[in-house]
Structures are given as C-alpha cells and as structure tokens.
Image (cartoon, grey):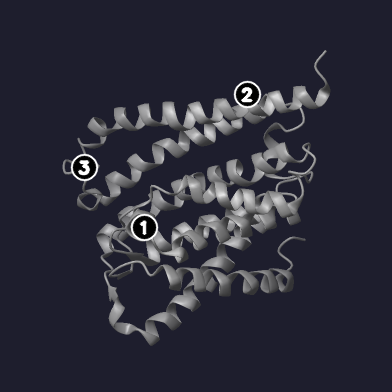
Amino acid sequence: MMHSMERRNLSYGIGLIIILIFWLVLGSSLTASLIPVLQMWFPDLSLREPGREPVGYFLLAQAGFVMLAAGILLAASRIPDLGIRGLFTDKRHIRFRLFTGSILLWLVLLGVISAFGMLIFPQETELTFSAPEFFTFLPLVLIFTPVQAGSEELLFRSYLRRWASGIPGVRNPGVLIPLSGALFLAAHLQNPEIQAFGGAVFIYGYYFLFGCLLMALTIHDRGVEAAAGIHTANNLFSLLILSYEGAVLPSPAVFTTGSLNPAASLAALVIAAPAYLKLREYLRLSN
C-alpha cells in the first residue's frame, strides 16, 4: 500500500509534469500559432530580430507564460494539500497590500540606485523616450508582466516550497533557498545576457542571488506575495524605465544603456535587498 508521503510526492510529481507540458509543449505551440496572427499587425515581427517589432515580440513572448500560469493553477487545483489559494499564501487571505507595496518599493529603490549610476556615469545612458511607442507598450506591459513574473514565482518559489515542506532535509531553508536560486538560474541560461556574459561570474551570481532572495522572502512570509511583487517590479523597471541594447525583451524604455553591466546589476541587487527589508518593516507592508 502506498504511504501518504509517497502519494503526496506522486501528486506533486504529476503536477510538475502537467506544468511542464503546459509551459514547454502547449506554450511553444501557442507561440508558433500566434506568429502569423501577430504578423498581420506587426509585419516586421521576427524571432531572430526582436528589436524590429518590440511590441509584437513582447506579446509573442507572453504566450508561454500564460500557459505556464494555466498549468500551475490546474496542477495546484488537483493537489489536496495545496489548492489554488495555497499557491499564493498559507494565510487565510492573499495579501495584496504586500504584493503592490513590494512593487512600488522595489521600483523606488531601483530608481534611486539607477539615478546615482547615471550621475556617476552619464555617458553610458541615453534618453530614448518616445511617447507614441511608450504609451502603446505601457498597458500591455502592465497587464502581462505580473502574469509572467507571477507564474515564475509560483513555480520556482511557491510550488517548490510547498512540495519540499513534506520532504525532510529538502525543506530546510539552508537547502531550499540555494536550490531555488540554482533552478532559477538554470531556467534563464538561454537568456541573451547570460549568453553574452557567459564567462562572467557576476551574471550567474545575479540570477542565483535573486532567486535566493525571493525564496527566502517566500519562506519568511509563508506566501509568494512579496516575491511576486519584487519580480514584477524588476521586470517593469527594465521594460519601461531602463533597458539595454540586446535585452531579452527589447522595449521603448525611457532610458537605454549601451550594454548590460553584470557587476553593476549584482551590486544594485546587493544594495536594494537589505534596503527593501528595512523599509518594508518600517512601512509594515506584511501586516
């Protein structure tokens, strides 16, 4: 007879298979089917040259994440000790104030840090604001970025934490936090910035530490609200405020730098993380 722990692990394992099928198989199929549809509105849309139609390419890139979100919700609904609400929090209610407050606070911190960087190295940043392109892009980014960032957080933080909570050894934060960071890094190894700076330890360190920070917050909060808020803010900032040439998602951001600086990105994360923790306590975001 199968023990309860074995049944639980089997449920989560089957759930993970469902998630991966939705994300990698159905997501890829949806992406492929959307290309000719989007080319009706964005005739220069190209997977090889995403910068030619940044709005169309952005929409195309969201297909996989929409399917990822659908797969996670479906899988969670079929796991008895998880459920859809359990994906987001162990509390009785989802803490939207923690989510939105984390978005705003992280955006402010990134803005302040980036402003100092621009003052010190003004020659490396160019004002690229174009009102028509920016305001066309803005509503799409505000709609889809929380889905994209949130779906990654539900998988790499929430689903992983809830599965590991029943596995002795793995549920130890000293194991779970670096495991989440390593998986998050692995999932982004094909990003253009990692391909470009593959020999630089800073770019690997950035993704690994970012994943570790978000898992540590998820464990502490017993919910994914803060992690999803920070991840959403991080992506909003890079899409709308400060982008760089060769970004994974080209966008009509207000400012653009010539290239990504992995060391500066890692330094910004190291500065922003403790500042966020102090300020969120002062603002009582988690209350």
Name the residue tied to disc 2: 14
Q: Which residue type carries mark 1?
A: Glu
How far separated are the C-alphas under marks 2 and 3? 35 Å
| Measured Cα–Cα span from mark 1 to mark 3 | 19 Å
How far across and down, in percent of the image, does residue 13 sit?
64, 27
Residue 260 position within the rendered picture, expressed as x and y whole percent measured from the top left: 35, 66
The residue where tag 1 is placed is 193
- Where in the figure is residue 32, as x and y percent of width and height? 30, 30
Quadrant location of residue 159? top right
Identified by mark 2, the residue type is Ile
Describe the element under mark 1 as helix, strand or loop: helix
Residue positioned most to the bottom:
120
Q: Quadrant of the N terminus?
A: top right
**In the rendered image, the vertical position of residue 207 relative to residue 71, given as above or below:** below
Residue denoted by label 3: 46
Q: Classify residue 239 as left or right of residue 22.
A: left
